[in-house]
Image (spheres, grey):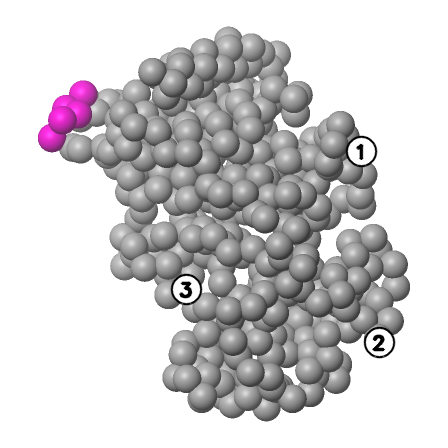
Amino acid sequence: MGYCPCFCLLNWKRFQRETNNKEQQSYVNAESGSKVNSNTRLEASNPVTRNRSSNTAPTFTYKELAIATNNFAEESFLGRGGFGAVYKGILESSNQVVAVKQLDLEGLQGEKEFLVEVLMLTLMHHPNLVNLIGFCAEGEQRLLVYEHLPLGSLEDHLFDVTPDMEPLDWNTRMKIAAGAAKGLDYLHNANPPVIYRDLKASNILLDKGFHPKLSDFGLAKFGPIGDKSHVSTRVMGTYGYCAPEYASTGRLSMKTDIYSFGVVLLELVTGKKAVDEIEGRQMHLIHWALPLMKDRGNYVRLVDPLLRRQFSMSLLNKAIEVASICLNENANLRPSSTDLVSAMEYLVSRKYEPDKDKANKSWPEINLSPSAAEAVLEKDLDRDRAVAEAKLWGESWRDKRKQ
């Protein structure tokens, strides 16, 4: 099987030359947590020429975006993104369908998120990152204009699936995971590297054909450079997706994103939310899944019933092994984003074909109640064997690539 090399590195020096100093200083202020004064804000009371050949995001007036969204009408509401509501709109000037996020500017954090997202998405472009069409910074208004992705988010298709919805099949789930991994790999291999810090199902948007794109970059942060292993920062992100070392110490690294990817991959396999409310009790996917992941014989218990046994056991084993490595409590033992892309591309290349996998038809019905899960949780948690097997498979796959 052929190997696709990791996606291109970001030529940061070239972008720095082309980006004006005022915007760079705004971003530095936002990253460092210093106060953002009126002189560094991206004010734009008048629209500018919308030329995407440069690395300056086009601007819109508030009136333009109000018209596009029918004055932010309820029927235009798509949902909530990071720090604000998102509306569907149609730009009057081009008839382009867009998604408009209106930020809730409660104190400095909303302003910081706005500045970070504008700069990140202005500088970074990749097939698995959402495209920024432009922004509005008129008076106190802060709005971001993105391409509209018609299929919504992964969260919309994975959880609370209604009877009239077609559940995601195995091949589509692996395709989405692989695309998310490629987006992370692009960020992590930028120069300097970028830590996404908010990978979760609701931030993976889906274009036609279930092509995934990472969105909401307001929490993104430059990663460590040189011989530094991490950066220290205030803990941000979403409960249930945060790596344990980051949640407890504030130490942030690229491996923090890898842990979050492991949670998302588990969500794709199980159809369960990272944190959910069941019968009045808060259930954590990781706490339920990890005891089962230590024994291959239990892997089938993890599978989303909506998959209806339409998957290969060998690929299920490998997908769970990838998740297991990503969720290692020792951040140093988690894979790099580049190795993660290689593993996911392997899983995507081995598509499930029902006619070639008859064994699944004989599987028994297996259900694990919350009480049964709790009984498993009471046992000592020993994942050494599963982790060792996963590492062995990963090393074997890397060796095959080199041949």
Residue of label 1:
249
Q: Amino acid at mark 3?
A: Leu
Q: Amino acid at mark 1?
A: Thr
Which label lies toward us, 1 or 2?
2
Q: Is residue 377 above or below residue 224?
A: above
Point out the tag, 1 or 3, that comes first from the N-terminus. 3
Say which quarter of the image contains residue 218.
bottom right
Say which quarter of the image contains residue 36.
bottom right
Q: Residues within 10 Å of mark 1 (few under 14, many from 20)?
A: few
Mark 1 → mark 3, Cα distance in angstroms: 36 Å
Q: Are marks 1 and 2 in contact (CB under 8 Å)?
A: no
The magenta region covers 355-359
The kind of secondary structure element at disc 1 is helix
Mark 1 → mark 2, Cα distance in angstroms: 33 Å
Residue of label 2:
38
Q: Residues within 10 Å of mark 3 (few under 14, many from 20)?
A: many
Q: Is residue 139 above or below residue 117?
A: below
**Residue at figure coordinates x 35%, y 29% from the top left:** 3
From the viewer's side, name the closer residue of 185 and 314: 185
Question: How far from the left and from the top, in percent, is residue 186?
Answer: 52, 44
Quadrant holding the C terminus: top left
